[in-house]
Image (cartoon, rainbow, N blue to C red):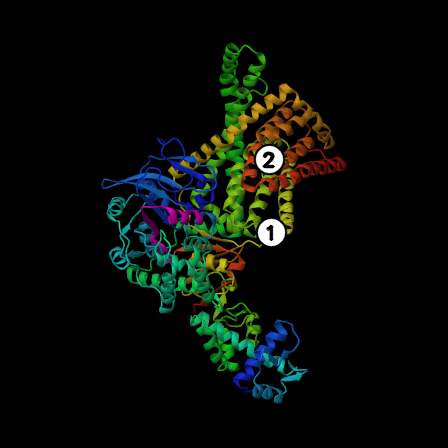
Amino acid sequence: MTLDIKERALTGLRRLRVRRRSQSSCHGSGPTAASGLPTLVIVGNPNVGKSALFNRLTGARVVVSNYPGTTVEVTRGHLRADGVELEAVDTPGMYSFLPITEEERVARRILLSESSYLVLHVVDAKNLERMLPFTLQLIEAGLPVVLAVNMLDEAEAAGLEIDLARLEQELGVPVVGTISTSGRGIDTLRHRIATTTASVVPPRTYDDKVEAAVSEMEGMLKGEYRLSRRAVALLLLQDDAEIEQMVEDAEGDGWGSINEFLLRLRTGRARSLGYTISMQRQRWATSLVRRTVLASGRRGRNWGELISRVTMNPITGVPILLLVLYFGLYQFVGVFGAGVLVKFLEDTVFGQWVNPVAIQVVEAIIPWPILQTLFVGEYGIITLGIRYAIALILPIVGTFFLTFSILEDTGYFPRLAMLIDRVFKAIGLNGRAVIPMVLGFGCDTMATMVTRVLESRRERVIATLLLALAIPCSAQLGVILAILSPHPRALALWGVIVLAVFLLIGLLAARVMPGQRPSFYMEVPPMRMPRLGNILSKTYARMEWYLFEVMPVFIGASVIIWIGQITGIFQALIRLFEPIVELIGLPPQVAAVFLFGFFRRDYGAAGLYDVHAAGGLSGEQLLVAAVTLTLFVPCIAQFSMMLKERGVRTTLAIVAFIFPFAFGIGFVVNALLTAAGWQL
Amino acid sequence: MDLSDDAQEILERLWIHSQEAQKDGLPLAEDGAALDEAAVRELADNNLVRAQDGRLELTPDGLPEAQSAVRRHRLAERLMADVLDTSDPMMDESACRFEHLLHRELEQRVCTLLGHPRVCPHGRPIPPGDCCRRAAKGGPQLVAPLSALKPGRGGTIAYLNTQEPRELQKLMSMGILPGMPIDLIQDFPSYVFRLHHSQFAVDKDLAGRIYVRLAD
């Protein structure tokens, strides 16, 4: 299903865990197979077709579901090969055995802890030279390895001929050529997986000096490890903190002399031993590729490459970005999703069918009016809670996720990331933050969770703040576009103000927050024609996450609002709010909009819509209300996600800043409009 | 000026002591180890150093001579580490012997070959020479950082100029290692390059770490 694993890894999908429908509960956080079956761990660089291969091997018997928590986000499925039953594990992409990002750490932890397994290393046939060093690391680790040389079709199109038999002979492990999208080579792969059990002796790669250090280190290791001693020794020599911790725990008293040995190796070195080891490994890979890959030199410039250049060149890339925004966001999400679809669902489906029936049924079975209002009252669970959820949010969020998935599948986001990196650097982020930021326009709650892919804590905090402050979610966006579109000048001003706040606060946050300047690096995968199956499954996965994670919070919020209503607490809170609302030039009934807006962002936006529909607001007031509501404290779902991801202190600090700031900006905008005497 | 090896070593120590550590005068004897007397005398005879209160310091004449000695030493280290791929501690020894062979003409050629590096493999600054200043004005180059290349140009990676282990690891994990062929595709707003059949985007900082031996 998935091709652009790079992006996939960067999005919420990573947190979505595939499990079989028959297994109703989660497996616990450890990566050990719950089924007791031997496991097949699929590893490899991002963007080599791992997940597509996973789906080919396991069949389409998997569903995507969310797995809460911060530990493991891996995909599991069953696989039958020549009568042998295995549990296959798809891991996040990793570039090498030495992890840099949290995702790579997750992937390696599986390799370090999973018992009784076989490793399927998936590589891109076009880039063998770059990927074979990792194969070597796996073989060195003493793991039984099968190598899948994937995307053979693309390699052939690039004029490369790979001698797979020779490669297998030199590596000593089974090598199978595959095309995961078409299924070529899958049966052979299945067979080789079933018949491979043993690890092999790694080929000789390093010079005498490295070998001497490795064997001395090996001799000092006495503990029990999943990996071979040689692999542990090599990792130690490469200054890996996590491995050092592991060895310290395993060796006990022996650690002292090991650490001393390491320190002695390090002192006075110009180049880390890790660098030397990587160099020698690469040299081995390069020479192996020379012996096994024949390049015919034919490398035509294809359409994908041309489109790629056009999207990356700022002169053409920026207009393309604007077109994407206009058609993808404004026309499809705003006009079609928030307009046509919402109108149909609100007026026809709920207005004519659901609500009348629900009211009748509830009134017939529940005799007490106060309980009736819980379900079908002004703020009832069905008439308001579910109606908003299904008729208002679902079409807007759904169309947004569809657009997002299409863009993701083509490989557009890495290009957007490189275009925007300089701007993001100014606000303390880097191009990689493009994924959570764009996702925020769909659902800020999901985007807050996805900030996890950012490298440093500083970046994660800044991104969380900006998401909470200045990125309107699709529900808000849809309604704001709808109510401001009759006032084009107000709409334009709203855009300018929110963008200015985004940049200004980003700039300030980057100054105030201590920490290192982030660096930007990203693989830019080839532009590919999006596949319908991929798009649908990604959209479906996100929709499912949204429905099961965000929606229950919203339904719960409906109950809180109901309780607040009947106890009179809300009325009191609204009265407290009213003077503030009047201070920024809005009629008092907008106070309720803000309060509800916290419990559900869409309530706020939709409430504003209701006030507007009743003819209560002028263009200027709409602008002030839209700006304040956009900046105002995030919804309760996002708030709880912030607590979970960033902790109480950071979250409260962010909220304490946003609350007065949003109203302050509202006040200033109102004052300026009044002073200038503008009619919008 | 032809100085003995020991005299040059003292000059280098004086430079590091006074210019980089910003301290006054090098003690003639410290912790029981005294500076080589003959070498100190040689330097003093050439009016490069003077002794005061048991401390040695550089004269105005000695300053450029010391700078040049430091430059040669660190260039030699760079050459050992990056091009000849010598791993230390062998490097230090070879560099010491090599630096004395680098007279002015050769020094500039080596510097050009290396792409006018700014720091030695240990991360200490290499004082710039005339050739570096000319190169900055657009003279011919053999090795240049990726960030200085024009789109469409390329070559093979000569070395990675970074002391940051994390940064080095990032670059290495993408397969960016000496000897790999590299082509720059785009240089604004980010640097996009091709490495074999993959493309990567990096910012200016990272692009400045990748030194490329230019193809003709």
Residue drawn at x 51%, y 78% as measured from the top left: B107
| Above-or-below relation of B70 to B190 | below
Q: Quadrant of residue A517?
A: bottom right
Q: Main secondary structure of the magenta part?
A: helix
- Residue A255 appears at what percent x and percent y? 44, 58
Q: Nearer the viewer, residue A31 or A523?
A: A31
Amino acid type of the residue tagged 2 in the rendering: Pro
Judged from the image, the secondary structure of the residue bearing numbered disc 1 is: helix
- Residue A360 appears at what percent x and percent y? 51, 12
**Which residue does the numbered mark 1 point to in the structure image?**
A426
Residue B212 at least partly seen: no
**Which residue does the numbered mark 2 point to in the structure image?**
A634
Residue B121 at least partly seen: yes
Q: Residues within 10 Å of mark 1 (few under 14, many from 20)?
A: some
Magenta region: A105-134
Residue drawn at x 44%, y 45% as measured from the top left: A9
Q: Quadrant of the C terminus of chain B?
A: bottom left
